[in-house]
Amino acid sequence: MTNKITVMKGDGIGPEICDAVMQILKAAKADVTFECFEVGEAEYKRNGELIPKEAYESFERNRIMLKAPITTPIGKGFRSLNVTLRKRYDLYANIRPAKSNTAVVTPFPNVDIVTFRENTEDLYVGVEEEVDENTVHATKIITRKASERIIEDAFEYALKHGRKKVTCVHKANILKLSDGMFLSIFQEIAKRYPSIIAEDKIIDALCMRLVMDPSEFDVLVMPNLYGDIVSDLTSGLIGGLGLLPSANLGKDHAMFEAVHGSAPDIAGKHIANPTALLWSACMMLEYLGQNDCAGKIRKAVDVVLAEGTSVTPDLKGNATTEQYRDAIIAKLS
């Protein structure tokens, strides 16, 4: 049966890059069909809902989603829709692979790091309390259940993909109870995987080492907030968020998304780079068992990036989104 995919087209550049990715998937003969929905700030202004009921119902039916960026107001306004979706569907594992490519020259040409970010708790969920007009408390939540499953997933991924090392990232020297428990659980689980090197790094030390020699690291696993920050850092090592895909996996649902913002300043200018969303779509195809199709698309993208003549301005080219899309389609074989 053809797989039905719920598509949330986002706002800002979301609809543009979403359309480009869907056309590439169609040209590659991916075995998928799409149920598309407008979501985000513009949808709220039109219909009073950030995510329409029909979009939720579609995801609950199909259980797989491709999501473009959605604007989140800073310091005010509505809560992040990403956080809402992750919590509502228990999408506890955020997997973000950062791998060097030939399109962007960086000081580190051989980066190959996969970040496993716990996705449902920690400070990132935004549990805050105003104690008085001069004091605000934010609650950091770490549980055994959430910690165990993300750490187990990181080790299982390493085992399945021939990875040699898993690094636990924490601040247990200061947060002795919360991060201390996360680290303790990591050490317990690591004993079940004797073939994989298990180490831990304090978050600040990790960041220093990543920008000095990222080849030290392979698979990283960490609580939610650190994962958000560190995965952005690893994207910088390979050329930016426009090249970083992402999967959000739960027991029953899976959401694949670009992790960059909605970039409203360039919306409608036809210069947005759809690579991160396209590579997220490739992760989606692999999740569906369509590895050959995903590989064909990845190969086509690699060729276009290597040639460098049909890439978007963020990659130092002058192609439009549509020209970049068409160049990839032309390389599909």
Image (cartoon, helix red, strand yellow):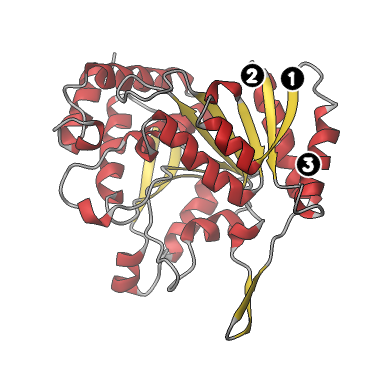
Question: Which residue of the protein is positioned furthest toward the top in this rendering?
Answer: 333
Answer yes or no: do the residues labelled 1 and 2 have beta carbons within 8 Å?
yes
| Residue hosting label 2 | 163
Front tag of 1 and 3? 3
Q: Position of residue 142 (x, y in %)?
A: 74, 54
Amino acid at circle 1: Ile
| Residue hosting label 1 | 196
Tell whether 16 sits left or right of 233: left
The quadrant holding residue 4 is top left
Task: Specify few, some or many for label 2: CA neighbours under 10 Å numbering under 14, 14-19, or 20 or more.
Answer: some
Residue drawn 47% across the image and 53% down it: 58
Determine the CA span between mark 1 and mark 2. Answer: 8 Å
The quadrant holding residue 253 is top right
Determine the CA span between mark 2 and mark 3. Answer: 20 Å
Q: Position of residue 179 (x, y in %)?
A: 75, 49
The front one of 213 and 311 is: 213
Sooner in the amino-acid sequence: mark 2 or mark 3: 2
The front one of 85 and 13 is: 13
Mark 1, secondary structure of its residue: loop
Q: Position of residue 223 (x, y in %)?
A: 66, 47
Tell whether 277 sits left or right of 217: left
Tell whether 187 sits left or right of 291: right
Mark 2, secondary structure of its residue: loop
Front tag of 2 and 3? 3
Determine the CA span between mark 1 and mark 3. Answer: 16 Å
Q: Is residue 289 visible?
A: no
| Residue hosting label 3 | 183
Q: Is residue 58 visible?
A: yes
Residue drawn 27% across the image and 50% down it: 13
Amino acid at circle 2: Arg
Residue drawn 35% across the image and 38% down it: 242
